Amino acid sequence: MSHYQESVYLQGHIIDSLVLAKVLDLILMMGGTFDLEDVHIGKTRAEPSHARIRIRTASRMLLDDILRKIQPHGASIEREADCRTDRAPADGVLPDDFYATTHLPTQIRLNGRWLDVDRIEMDLAITVNEAGSVAQAVPMGEVRQGDQIVVGREGVRVIPLQRPQERDVFGFMESQVSAERPHGHIIADIAARMRQLKERRSQRQTDSHVLLSGGPAIIHAGGREALTWLIEQGFIHILFCGNALAAHDMEADLFGTSLGYGLTAGRAVPHGHEHHLRTINRIRSIGSIEAAVTSGVIKQGVMAACIRQGVPMVISGTIRDDGPLPGVITDSIQAQRAMRALIPDIGLALLVASTLHSVATGNLLPATVPTVCVDVNPSVPTKLADRGSFQAVGLVMDAASFLSELARLLGRST
Amino acid sequence: MSRLLVCPPEFFGIEYEINPWMRLTNRVDHGRAVRQWHELMRVFEQDLGVVLERMTPIPGLPDLVFTANAGIVVGRTAVVSRFRYPERQREEAHFENWFRKHGYEVMTGEAGIHFEGAGDLLGFPEYWFGGYRQRSDIRVFPILSEHFHREIIPLELVDSRFYHLDTCFCPLSGGELLYFPAAFDSYGQTAIAERVPDKLRLTVPEDEALKFACNAVCVGKHVVLPAGCPTTQAWLRIRGYETHPVQLDEFMRSGGSAKCLTLALD
């Protein structure tokens, strides 16, 4: 993490004397940024004012320079305490008063030094190794008796998102959900990001993976070809979905239908509702989706593209699943764990046409990952934002139109 | 009736260099300095009716004569200075003794927070200004402000020739202000302008500022100031003050003038 920060405290008659203004100007002029925290302005002339200023810089040296420059104006460095830890009392049980994480970059202070918390994710705890050299976010269920867990709030700091340098739709990093906004420029910005990430991935750079988390409406609505193309062309590198997307994708390959509807004819075919069951049964008899693809039973589509491209998939089950397909993880904690394992290195997340998977994936993503949530129903991106994933850009539109337009912008001929 | 603390210049001289005015090669005419000091005292006592409290001068402490830096006196409380330079730190005990002997409640500041007394803290009855950066530490002002329930507006001094606030800033009894703006940064200049209306502020011309026109002592409608500052004197007279110029150039060799040589006790 390239953030260096320190809190300073300024007190006295700092408003009328313009001492506060001077200190803030100095910070900015020297190339730092600041957040004003806890400003109190004296109500009478005699009553002093005070302000706590959190200074951030891109380098330790600049931070030290700024601190040296502002100290003569009365800015004193806050004495910060180390974080406190306590042992987990039992497997899967956190100590009372454990620190609950946000999905923002977080640091803890240990032995006087600030340490980045790895794999940050919302609603977890923070565990520290015995040497005190590594801090990591940990889900409640993964905690083992005796693990050192951060408790209280002291010595923990959360770093607000810096505005990214790119001046695209992600620059705002805030949910904007409306069906009444033009989509074109948003999809163009997403396409531009995907082109960059493909390039970065080919150079083996970090944070270069594109995740697509999708629901079966992608297949029902006719987005299958576009998504297949995006995977085949190396624009999508991880797939999260449920039993249904996989089943209907392969149903389309075997029967030309999705949930019994003829995808080309656009109408229900006789006994079409059985097609997805027959598909699941066929794959179960083969043993795995991978075997179905490599043996040539499944020839085209999203599953086939993922297998051929080596795109890792996490297929998570739900209560109403038929079958399920082999490879579907029916233990939701296991599924969470499998999804979590693929989160590091994601540089863009596309959450398309699935309420459950969008919210579940959103909860696993750090706030620093640019995220797009596409759904015809405005309540989905809204729900995602309400659950804390404020960085997600909401796009109210049909999944197939979105994927087709995205593929077109990335070079697919229509 | 005003009372001022002063210290006869028996041992005054230049024995070190701690401001741009002091030059070891620039010898003080001691006899002349003594005559100038006595003339200043005569003006205070005879022309203005001020009561003078005389400290005993100490050999080896040439700057003890500049009693403005003894500390500040508010009512019966004296806050003793904590000098920045070791050369003057040796004066602290003598000033403290004097205050104690004369019945003042003595307040000493935190070690490491420099404060050079009335040289850096002066103002109007309702609020004060504090000069910092050259000698005093800005951190002293919130402490004093809280103790005396008085607003203190810190002003950064940016020109080392004007190393104390009282060398470039002089509030007067009628609410007027003599000052030399270039001794302050733009923030300080703005803060001053927002407090003291235009018509009450006299920007002292540079040649008079360099003669320490602002190092003046205001007692009621009388202003005692260094000789050779006609513009400042003319403005003061227009504002209804009687001016008392005194030749103090021997003390200017050390970077001090009328105000530096006195400390207001009441």
Image (cartoon, rainbow, N blue to C red):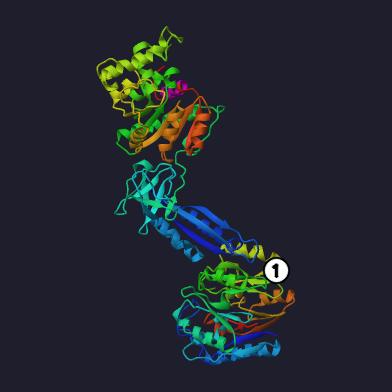
Would residue A186 be found to the left or right of residue B173 on screen?
Answer: left
Would residue A216 be found to the left or right of residue B229 on screen?
Answer: left
Which residue in the protein does label 1 denote?
A: B200
Residue A6 locus on image (x, y percent): 44, 56
Would residue A204 be found to the left or right of residue B248 on screen?
Answer: left
* Residue visible at 47% across and 36% down in the picture: A170
* Relative to A15, residue A101 above or below: above
Residue B1 figure quarter:
bottom right
Chain containing mark 1 = B
Q: Is residue A139 visible?
A: no
* Relative to A389, residue A154 above or below: below
Of B38 and B207, which appears nearest the observer? B38
Would residue A347 be found to the left or right of residue B56 on screen?
Answer: left
Of B88 and A96, which appears nearest the observer? A96
Magenta span has B113?
no
Magenta span has A405?
yes
Residue A84 locus on image (x, y percent): 39, 56
Q: Which residues are magenta?
A: A400-409
Residue A26 locus on image (x, y percent): 50, 57
Q: Amino acid at mark 1?
A: Leu
